[in-house]
Structures are given as C-alpha cells and as structure tokens.
Image: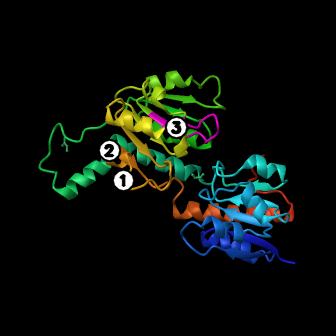
Amino acid sequence: QLLKVFVTRRIPQEGMRVLNQSGLCKVSLWDSDEPIPRTDLLQGVSGAHGILCLLSDRIDAEVINAAGPNLKVISTLSVGFDHLAVGEIKKRGVRVGYTPDVLTDATAELTVALLLATARRIPEGVEEVKNGGWSSWKPLWLCGYGLSGSTVGVIGLGRIGLAIARRLKPFGVKRLLYSGRTSKPQMGTSLDRLVSESDFVVVSCSLTPETQGLCDKALFSKMKKTAVFVNTSRGAVVNQEDLHEALSSGRIAAAGLDVTTPEPLPTDHPLLKLKNCVILPHIGSATYSTRGIMAELCANNLLAGLTGSAMPSELAL
Ligand code: GLV
Ligand code: GLV
C-alpha cells in the first residue's frame, strides 16, 4: 500500500527524484510555480500521510484536520518554521522535518551582498546609469558607507548569524557585536548596546513571539544616524511603519531587506518609494545547488517520517 504524499508546489527535481524512486509513496503535486490556493491545499492534503510544504504555506489546525488521521509528517523546504503551528502539530503526534545547515552559506552570502549593495548604494547607481543621471565622475555623488574599520552588530547568533559574521570579518570590520538567545556570554552584548554602537545592524534571528516586531521605533531611535540596517530573517521581526519613518526622516541611513510583510510586498508600498531602502524578493537561499540540496534533504526528511525512522533534520517540537 503506497503512502500518500502531497507536495504543495513544483520543487527542484532532486527532491522529486528521491520521492519517486523510494517506491514508498504516491506523490500528488500542485504542479505550479505559484502558491496553492487555500481551498486546493485543504483538498490536496486530504488523506495524506506526508505533506511537503513551503514557507509560504500556512500549516495550521485547519490543514492538519483536512489531512486527517493518516498524517505522520510535515516536511518544509525551509529552515524557518514560523509558518507551522508547531503546538498543534506536536499535539497530533506529527513529526516535522526542515532544512537547516544546507542553506547557511547561501544565505550568509546573500546577506553580505545585500549589506554591500545597500551601504554602497549599488541599485541606485545602476539606476542612474540607466536613466542618464550619470553626468560625470563627481566627488560628492553616491557616497555610502564602507565596512573597513566599522562595527557590525548581528542580532541572532545562530548558524546563519555566525556565518555572516565570519564573512564580514575579512572586510576589515573592527568590532563584531552579537546578541541573541544563545549568545555566548563572552561575546554576547545587550541589544541596546549593539544597536547604539553598530555601524551595520544585521538581523538574523528566527521569528518567534519574542522577536515579532523587535525592530521598532524605540530600537531605530537608538541607532546611529549613519547606521545601515539589514534583515534577511523574517519580515515580521521589523515594524515596517517604524522602519519607513526611520528611513524617510534620516533617523538611520539605509536599509536592505530580503524579507518583508507581506510577501510579496505590494508594488505601491511606501518602502519601495525610498532610495535608501533596497528590497529583495526573499532569495537568501536561492542558489541552484542550495535549492537542489534543500529539496533532497526535504524529501529524505519526509520519507524518514513516513517510515518512522530517524530524519536527517528533524525539528525538535
Ligand atoms: C528561508 O527563509 C528559509 O526559512 O529557509
Ligand atoms: C577613482 O576611480 C580614482 O581613480 O580615484
């Protein structure tokens, strides 16, 4: 008897191959690059033993009920799991797989790229070249902030935060400050000190009730006027109205965001009108090889959940 697996989107073939070659399951796929409508999700998971989902799928009690009593495992193609109602999932005895580690390098790399792009005003410069704004080499034009000799503060010293810090160090960063749940006492610092002393403030924490809206007016008001703020974790860690106010009033210098609320951000959103705000469409882990490895890991987590064996990466609930 083949076990039913529901996959909520087209995923890299590395993942589909693992599922199809296992001989364990019958896969039904939402065969699209666009998000599955909620009603189709609720229908699709019906009777499923396993669900392979994305960070854009909200997996809550309603979905678990729609799946029914067969459900053994939910495997998400992400390291973040704020889209999963973990309390509810745990209560039902359903196991969860996720994809830490394999996307750490790609995400840290993108964070450094976004930080440099924001601080050195690269998108603005590209735009000026295209629109004829480049009239000559000008001593006072398009100046930004450099990493050399700077202080960088990383909020959330997890796997990715640490990888970001390691990559920034060789740029001549003078001081690295960390704060976070697990920060080692000898390196950790208070959030207040971190934001007030840092030239670059990088957010790399997970979204939890404690970090929701953490970066708000009060926090921005403690930053240097020249501070560059970067977030590659989850949009909801930031109060976007407060960020808009901080950027438009010159309270801080610039912001680079790979994550927003909502995603996608509406094209008429006020943040998109600001030259000192660089916004990317949540592409932290988006390298060909990383996405392939994530899909493979995600599929292997799912299979392990179906067979009741040890998962390569199981989320401790
Ligand atoms: C990306 O944001 C992820 O959680 O994998
Ligand atoms: C810049 O191009 C310089 O030569 O200083």
- Left or right of 88? Residue 237 is left
- Secondary structure, mark 2, is loop
93 or 111: nearer the viewer: 93
| Residue picked out by circle 1 | 268
Q: Quadrant of ligand 2?
A: top left
- Relative image position of residue 303 (x, y in whole percent): 78, 66
| Residue picked out by circle 2 | 274
- Give the magenta range: 201-213
Whether tag 1 and tag 3 are in contact, CB under 8 A, the answer is: no
What is the chief secondary structure element of the magenta stretch? loop
208 within the magenta span: yes
The chosen color scheme is rainbow
Label of residue 165 in the image: 3
Examine the rendered structure and indicate whether residue 128 appears above or below residue 244.
Answer: below
Of all residues, the one furthest to the left in this rendering is 135
- Relative image position of residue 259 (x, y in whole percent): 49, 49
- Relative image position of residue 84 (x, y in whole percent): 69, 52
Residue drawn at 36 percent across, 46 percent down: 270
Q: Nearer the viewer, mark 1 or mark 2?
A: 1
Whether residue 41 is visible, yes or no, is yes
Amino acid type, label 1? Asp
Whether tag 3 and tag 2 are in contact, CB under 8 A, the answer is: no
269 or 131: nearer the viewer: 269
Amino acid type, label 3? Ala
The quarter holding residue 147 reads top left
- Relative image position of residue 50 (x, y in whole percent): 77, 65
Residue drawn at 52 percent across, 37 percent down: 165
279 within the magenta span: no
